[in-house]
Amino acid sequence: LTRRAWHLAAAAVGTDDAASAALEGAARQSLGRGGYTSAAAAFERAAKLSDDPQRRAMLLVAAAEAAWDGGAGERTLGLLNEAEATAALTARNRLAARRLAGRLMINRGPMMQGRAILIEAAELALSELDAPEEAIAMLTDASVACFLACDIRAFGDTARRIVEILPTAATPAARIRAALVTGGERIIGGDAGAGADALREAVAIADSHPEL
């Protein structure tokens, strides 16, 4: 499949939906094998071969995610910039791009700028997608920046926002994230007892859901 896809791409002149689809399939196959570098290359080439702006943007975000998983930070940034430049990102793909951009910024610095990107993305998840659990995942990522930067106030703001939006029927994963962030914030804020209780709650939820 992979060899055939690249042969189709090499023979393409201009855009070619069949070659693009074949390369996307090859990229997803590579992801399944942990071949992040080859997946990123295939997604990127598939994007260039697509004549659908939204699909091109989606494939560029997929390429960026694969590049990030493969440890290629600079390439990830370039691919995200290309995706944004298409001006064709759907709300879902824009959310994925913003989350990745925030994580990248936390890793590369400045960390609190990464937090700001993730906070904005979390609000996007709520307002445009009505997806509180995805927002909680991004706020959890944002809390890492607060911890690393030793910004107790920002950590507290992030923890409180997670509690505010935590659905009544939240999934175990969301409840674990909420408990971990709340516990960490309370410990750093000086309330070790309450923090330990929250962390024990997270462990208890995880123990009762071994599939996570």
Image: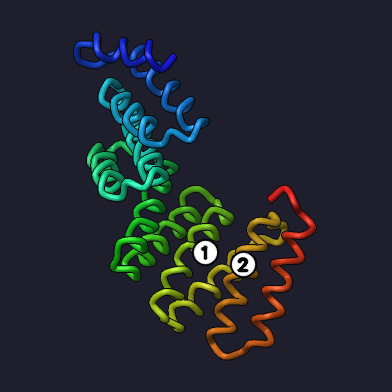
Q: Is residue 13 above or below residue 148?
A: above
Name the mark on residue 160: none
Residue 198 horizontal/vertical position (percent): 68, 75
Name the residue located 29 percent from the left edge and 68 percent from the top edge.
110
Judging by the rendered image, the residue that carries numbered circle 1 is 140
How many numbered markers are drawn?
Answer: 2
Name the residue located 25 percent from the left edge and 37 percent from the top edge.
86
Would you call the spot at circle 1 few (<14 residues within 10 Å), some (14-19), or many (20 or more)? many
Residue 102 horizontal/vertical position (percent): 37, 58
Query: For the residue labelled by badge 2, is the local secondary structure a helix, a strand or a loop?
Result: helix
Name the residue located 37 percent from the left edge and 20 percent from the top edge.
23
Q: Amino acid at mark 1?
A: Thr
Quarter of the image holding residue 118? bottom left
Would you call the spot at circle 2 few (<14 residues within 10 Å), some (14-19), or many (20 or more)? many
168 vs 50, nearest the viewer: 50
Q: Amino acid at mark 2?
A: Ala
Judge left or right: residue 43 versus residue 199.
Answer: left
Q: Is residue 71 above or below residue 35?
A: below
| Label located before the other in sequence (1 or 2) | 1
Judging by the rendered image, the residue that carries numbered circle 2 is 178
Outermost residue, left side: 13
Name the residue located 24 percent from the left edge and 40 percent from the top edge.
82
Residue 192 horizontal/vertical position (percent): 63, 87
| Quarter of the image where the N terminus is located | top left
